[in-house]
Amino acid sequence: MQPFKVHILGCGSAKPTPRHLASSQVVEIRGKLFLVDCAEGTQTQLMRSRLGFAKINNIFISHLHGDHCFGLMGLINSFGLLDRTAPMHIFAPAMGENIFQQLMEMFCPHPGFNVTYHPVDTYQRQIIYEDRSLTVETIPLEHRVPCCGFLFREKPSLPHINREMIDFYHIPVSQINNIKVGMDWTTDEGETIPNQRLVFPADPPRAYAYCSDTKYLPQLAETVKKVDLLYHESTYGDDKTDNAEKYCHSTARQAAMVARDAKAKKLMLGHYSARYNDETVLLCQAQEIFPNTILSNEGLVVNV
């Protein structure tokens, strides 16, 4: 199976603490790296992760609160200092495009590479990125400013070749691609070998949903139905349900309700309020609803 991993760079909320940095993570799919949110400290975390700056060509910003985007201009500036030439694509809420251009003119007027801002309509589900192996789709969320999550979904792959059968029937290498796309094989004696005997089933496509800052949305479960991994903000515990409602955030228990209703395979909590010195209380509350829940933490790498 090709690599599909989530690297946590920061999982705290607006107020940085000695224990957690603000939101940022890297989604690694088949050798490509996608940066999701870019808080202060992202550059340092990228260096610690040893993932490599040069592989990041696409950055997705969920919303324009500082704990999700204050590191962006510094990162672009550093790319320029590293003599980057590859183009960079920023996918972020449409309301920030003019501000972004002004910041670029002030701090990075000549980065040495093309930087393209792709305005995102955070209120619509739509595919905003696509290549041969995956799509990235927006997930409308409800926060105090326009905000969306991102759904990374693999495209279906071709089946695996059954090498023993290929060798047994002396099928030439030139026919392997035809076999993969469904062709039967006819031997020199005229016997037709069905395709299903020549291949193993393809790996099922995997999906990862990143749900950034949002109030509890019961309907969100349908959007992230049956994802392999769901990251859902869990700023508060049961003791601060009123705060969650007031500030358009979610509790750990509410995040678990979304995972349960979506029939997700695994839930990862994050975006912890600085008031919690130990997030175990959040984990326990979520696991009461959805047992297969884990805590995100800086340096954690999760296989999807």
Image: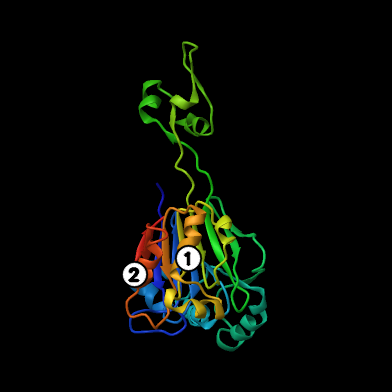
Q: Type of residue at label 1?
A: Ala
Compared with 245, 191 (above or below) is above
Task: Indicate the secondary structure of the residue bearing disc 1.
Answer: helix
Whichever of callouts 1 and 2 sits on the residue coming sooner in the sequence is: 1
Q: Residues within 10 Å of mark 1 (few under 14, many from 20)?
A: many
Measuring 57% from the left and 61% from the top, which residue is drawn there? 220
Q: How is the image coloured?
A: rainbow
Residue 293 percent across, percent down from the top left: 38, 61
Task: Indicate the secondary structure of the residue bearing disc 2.
Answer: loop
Q: What residue would you read off at disc 1? A: 255
Q: Residues within 10 Å of mark 2 (few under 14, many from 20)?
A: some
Front-most of residues 277 and 186: 277
Q: What residue would you read off at disc 2? A: 299
Front-most of residues 173 and 216: 216
**Residue 296 visible in the current orientation:** no
Residue 195 percent across, percent down from the top left: 49, 26
Measuring 48% from the left and 82% from the top, which residue is drawn there? 74
State left or right for residue 195 relative to residue 219: left
